[in-house]
């Protein structure tokens, strides 16, 4: 029914079409397959890592999904999970290497040999001319741990460059740095099933209902057992709507809020003195700092009624058991690490960690956001979450890799810094994979300048992303269903993705491509003779052995048998560690560290010219830069384009073209006027490309420790616009018709019905 | 209400449309969603609500009553089925008669489609696709006893009021405690 009937008939009340025009999978429907196989695997999208079955026909095509009763999700799926399989046979898939001889020329198909030879000769030329570190690798965390491990090894061993980093730098690093500081390990402390045992759950800066929809069942299971829910967010999200307390604070004031809460808890004697004395270090300094954050002062900074801070403090402080969660809302700040530490201070001061129903965790954003940051593709870490400047770790990993420790580079630049270094001419060549920074990095114009300044850029992907479109060489790689390997979900549970189908002809796995480049380069080529993900995993087990994220006891077979193993798991007879810190924290003395944090204002505060705060985030139908989800009909139909969410008191009508202006740029969005957002704050979802990109507006100031950009707040001005900015179609290779053209996403000028998208009644 | 049936709990709905996406996956109507998802308090909250066929029991399903072609079968189990393709004449009577706005007419085929509680699944003892995937449990499939075992504080009603007409349904709506014995306001009067 593709393309039929959309908007062609004036509808009588109660009569409508079925929206099927937009909801067709690009590869069409296949039904009633005889003798279909169900392949157990997990979703490719967020950090929940829901179990699912892929339906595979007898001739090996993935054609559907079936719910799977896995421990994590208990058959539940979100709309992205239900439609994820539609990527596999998508007509936009890249199936041949593409290359251009110089910028400005169109990409043209070439053979794998020609493409790889070009990559290798450019790596050689750039490294010989400018030095090893002039060639960088920018990776991602939506691929298996085997691949992310291999990327770190490839950069250090085959390229000998210090400049390797990953897109978790835009996502998880504030939480990671805060956790390392407080606990000396970077992992959520509890399995989510602990939520069923707790009395109070606090969620800060996490739009759980849209970004981790399937996690909401844990909140309701807890509430059905009597638990209270506190949400902290500038927007009253779908989870916040029914919370016992919703704290609608001003973006960029989280540390002041949590210091205010801890002030009241300390003042009212609700701290756990015994826990503080026995299991922590540094309370006195925190106590002295929070003394300055009276509810009145904190309320003033946060734009809140001080009574609300008192109320939260009492609900948390008086709870027998409590758990705190946070996500990017508090982490995407120049004080991202500090914000995280204020939540940890609250947890430690009240002794709410390390026991059933008592705990804390960040909610990892990407599918393998946890596993992808543990094994060495972070610029400052080696496998096993080891620090790259730890001499013992260096010598161990060098020995596993069979190289001399002196060959192992030191810490390199972080993600955004690599692109800024390209702009400055210090990084000349780049291999990118599993990311789309031209949509996802802040201050888009500067990022485009950085990529344009590269002498050579190679990008690996299975769809032609906005970033791949500008590359010199594009290498077509597998979608998740075409390869196997492990991921680690937001709880720290290692699960396994299984291969459901062969890749399309011409497509290679990311690990094959990396190994092949290494082999052709010749530098330690023998260290990249892997013939399967399993072979890489076996080496990873050894490389992580004795580290913080110890996978040594995890095998593919054990994962299949158990449904997932929580690290650390040092030996094959070890059951894994679902709950951390029951006896000790990971610092040598076993104690957790308090950190006193003084609130600092965001990098860009509102002023007369730009009086509003702009914040950015996700919507439920899309994932990250949208390179995958903007091509899936059902998801495009639900959320075809970005919008600006604003409060009715600003005087704009729903659907008005509203121009959002910042010092970086301007974009005109249709207004979604809702009373669920603060009047001083505007929200834009970030999944779409320039010229409609939220990241054309954001600031690129970084947290000094984690180097995370401040995506969650900058200053903006709203004006009545003329026409809303047209959303560009997702790129496809030259000569192809984009499937998305039929989905009508470009000509849509309307805002959604609600932040979650457009209702089925339209 | 039916023994094993659907319970709709709008309080839990997060409007994610997993139910809509999952409904489209059904082999008997791929690409068409039989479930409706509305943002019921536009501009004021993130509230949302799915609408499935409520499988009216008393009076017998209005859609079936008004069908001039006798195309909408009602099974002994209470399931009100989609109009039989060989009988449906695309007259829209059912569309207008349904108090919940459930049946839809495919304007290309001129055939009616409606939710049949995933008969292909529920008749084999499986849960409906929407309830299976619903991330929050806003759509629950099971008996009232099973609902209460899982959610001791929940109460449900299977009686809806439309002006002075009462409709008893096979599916039920989770309602605030104390409201389970009064009819659920049915919308426009």
Image (cartoon, coloured by chain):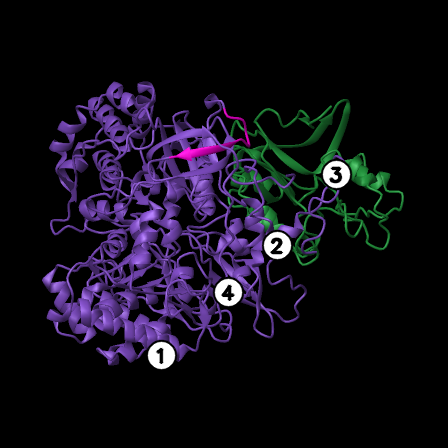
Chain colours: A purple, B green
Q: Is residue A535 visible?
A: no
Query: Which mark, by number, is residue A742?
Result: 2
Between tags 2 and 1, which lies in front?
2
Q: Quadrant of the N terminus of chain A?
A: bottom right
Q: CA distance from mark 4 to mark 1?
A: 33 Å
Alpha carbon separation for disc pair 2 and 4? 17 Å
Proximity of marks 2 and 1: CB atoms separated by less than 8 Å: no
Q: What residue did someone put label 3 on?
A: A11
Specify the subunit that label 4 lies on.
A
Question: Disc 4 designates what residue?
Answer: A734
Q: Is residue A431 left or right of residue A290?
A: right
- First in sequence, mark 2 or 4: give its number: 4
Image quadrant assignment for residue B63: top right
Identify the residue at image location x=74%, y=34%: A13
A639 displayed left or right of A493 = right
- Answer whether residue A341 is visible to the viewer in this image: yes
| Magenta stretch bounds | A652-661
Q: Secondary structure at mark 2?
A: helix
Residue that carries the numbered disc 1 in the rendered image: A531
Q: Give the mark, 3 or 1, whose residue is nearer the N terminus.
A: 3
Q: Residue at x 33, y 67 (%)?
A: A146
């Amino acid at each position: 029914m593709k393309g039929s009937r959309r908007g062609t008939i004036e509808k009588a009340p109660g009569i409508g079409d079925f929206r099927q025009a937009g909801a067709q999978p690009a590869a069409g429907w296949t039904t009633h397959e005889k003798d279909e196989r169900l392949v157990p695997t997990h979703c490719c999208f967020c950090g929940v890592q829901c179990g699912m079955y892929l339906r595979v026909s007898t001739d090996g095509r993935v054609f559907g999904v079936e719910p799977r009763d896995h421990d994590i999700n208990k058959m539940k799926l979100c709309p992205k999970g239900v439609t994820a399989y539609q990527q596999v046979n998508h007509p936009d898939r890249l199936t041949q290497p593409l290359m251009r001889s110089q910028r400005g020329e169109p990409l043209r198909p070439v053979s794998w040999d020609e493409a790889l030879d070009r990559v290798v000769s450019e790596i050689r030329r750039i490294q010989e001319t400018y030095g090893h570190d002039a060639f960088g690798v920018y990776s991602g965390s939506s691929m298996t741990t085997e691949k992310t491990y291999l990327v770190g090894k490839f950069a250090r061993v085959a390229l000998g460059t210090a400049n390797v980093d990953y897109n978790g730098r835009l996502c998880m690093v504030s939480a990671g740095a805060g956790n390392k500081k407080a606990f000396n390990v970077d992992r959520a402390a509890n399995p989510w099933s602990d939520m069923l045992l707790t009395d109070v759950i606090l969620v800060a800066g996490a739009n759980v209902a849209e970004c981790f929809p399937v996690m909401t069942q844990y909140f309701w299971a807890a509430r059905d057992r009597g638990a209270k829910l506190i949400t902290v967010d500038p927007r009253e999200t779908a989870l916040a709507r029914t919370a016992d307390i919703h704290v609608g604070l001003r973006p960029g004031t989280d540390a002041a809020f949590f210091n205010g809460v801890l002030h009241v808890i300390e003042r009212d004697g609700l701290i756990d003195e015994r826990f503080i004395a026995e299991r922590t270090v540094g309370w006195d300094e925190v106590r002295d700092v929070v003394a300055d954050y009276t509810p009145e002062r904190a309320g003033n900074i946060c734009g809140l009624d001080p009574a609300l801070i008192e109320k939260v403090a009492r609900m948390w402080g008086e709870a027998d058991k409590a758990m705190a969660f946070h996500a990017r809302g508090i982490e995407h700040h120049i004080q991202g690490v500090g914000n995280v530490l204020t939540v940890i201070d609250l947890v430690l001061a009240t002794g709410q960690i390390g026991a059933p129903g008592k705990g804390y965790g960040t909610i990892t954003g990407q599918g393998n956001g946890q596993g992808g940051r543990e094994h060495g593709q972070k610029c400052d870490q080696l496998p096993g979450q080891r620090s790259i400047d730890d001499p013992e770790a260096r010598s161990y990993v060098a020995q596993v890799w069979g190289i001399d420790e002196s060959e192992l580079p030191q810490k390199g630049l972080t993600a955004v810094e690599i692109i800024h270094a390209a702009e400055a001419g210090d990084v000349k060549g780049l291999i990118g994979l599993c990311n789309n920074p031209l949509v996802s990095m802040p201050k888009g114009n500067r990022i485009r300048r950085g990529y344009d300044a590269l002498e050579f850029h190679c990008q690996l992907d299975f769809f032609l992303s906005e970033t791949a479109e500008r590359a010199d060489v594009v290498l077509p790689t597998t979608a998740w269903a075409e390869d196997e390997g492990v991921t680690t979900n937001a709880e720290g549970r290692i699960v396994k993705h299984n291969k459901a189908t062969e890749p399309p002809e011409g497509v290679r796995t990311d690990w094959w491509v990396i190994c092949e480049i290494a082999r052709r380069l010749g530098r330690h080529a023998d260290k990249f003779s892997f013939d399967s993900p399993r072979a890489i995993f076996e080496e990873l087990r050894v490389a992580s052995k004795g580290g913080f994220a110890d996978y040594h006891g995890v095998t593919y077979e054990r994962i299949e048998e158990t449904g997932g193993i929580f690290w650390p798991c040092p030996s094959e007879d070890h059951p894994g560690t679902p709950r951390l810190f029951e006896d000790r924290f990971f610092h040598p003395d076993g104690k957790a560290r308090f950190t006193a944090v003084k609130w600092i204002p965001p990098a860009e505060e509102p002023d007369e010219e730009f009086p509003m705060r702009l914040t950015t985030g996700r919507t439920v139908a899309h994932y990250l830069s949208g390179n995958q989800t903007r091509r899936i009909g059902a998801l495009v139909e639900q959320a075809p384009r970005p919008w600006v969410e604003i409060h009715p008191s600003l005087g704009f009508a729903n659907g008005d073209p509203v121009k959002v202006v910042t010092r970086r740029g301007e974009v005109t969005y249709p207004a979604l006027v809702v009373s669920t957002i603060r009047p001083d704050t505007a929200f834009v979802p970030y999944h779409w490309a320039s010229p409609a990109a939220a990241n054309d507006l954001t600031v690129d100031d970084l947290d000094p420790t984690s180097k995370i950009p401040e995506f969650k707040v900058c200053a903006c001005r709203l004006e009545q616009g003329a026409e809303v900015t047209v959303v560009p179609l997702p790129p496809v290779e030259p000569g192809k018709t984009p499937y998305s053209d039929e989905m009508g996403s470009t000509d849509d000028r309307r805002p959604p019905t609600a932040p979650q998208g457009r209702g089925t009644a339209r | 209400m039916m023994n094993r049936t659907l319970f709709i709990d709008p309080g839990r709905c997060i409007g994610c449309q997993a139910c809509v996406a999952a409904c489209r996956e059904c082999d008997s109507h791929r690409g068409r969603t039989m479930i409706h998802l509305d943002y019921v308090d536009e501009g004021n909250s993130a509230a949302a609500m799915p609408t499935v066929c409520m499988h009216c029991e008393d009076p017998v399903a209005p859609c079936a009553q008004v069908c001039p072609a006798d195309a909408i079968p009602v099974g002994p189990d209470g399931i009100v089925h989609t109009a039989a393709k060989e009988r449906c004449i695309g007259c829209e009577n059912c569309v207008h008669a349904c108090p919940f706005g459930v049946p839809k007419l495919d304007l290309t085929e001129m055939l009616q489609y409606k939710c049949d509680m995933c008969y292909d699944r529920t008749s084999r003892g499986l849960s409906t696709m929407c309830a299976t995937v619903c991330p929050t449990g806003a759509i629950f499939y099971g008996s009232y006893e099973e609902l209460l075992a899982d959610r001791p504080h929940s109460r449900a009603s299977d009686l809806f009021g439309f002006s002075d007409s009462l409709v008893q349904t096979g599916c039920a709506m989770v309602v605030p405690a104390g409201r389970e014995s009064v009819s659920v306001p049915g919308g426009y009067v």
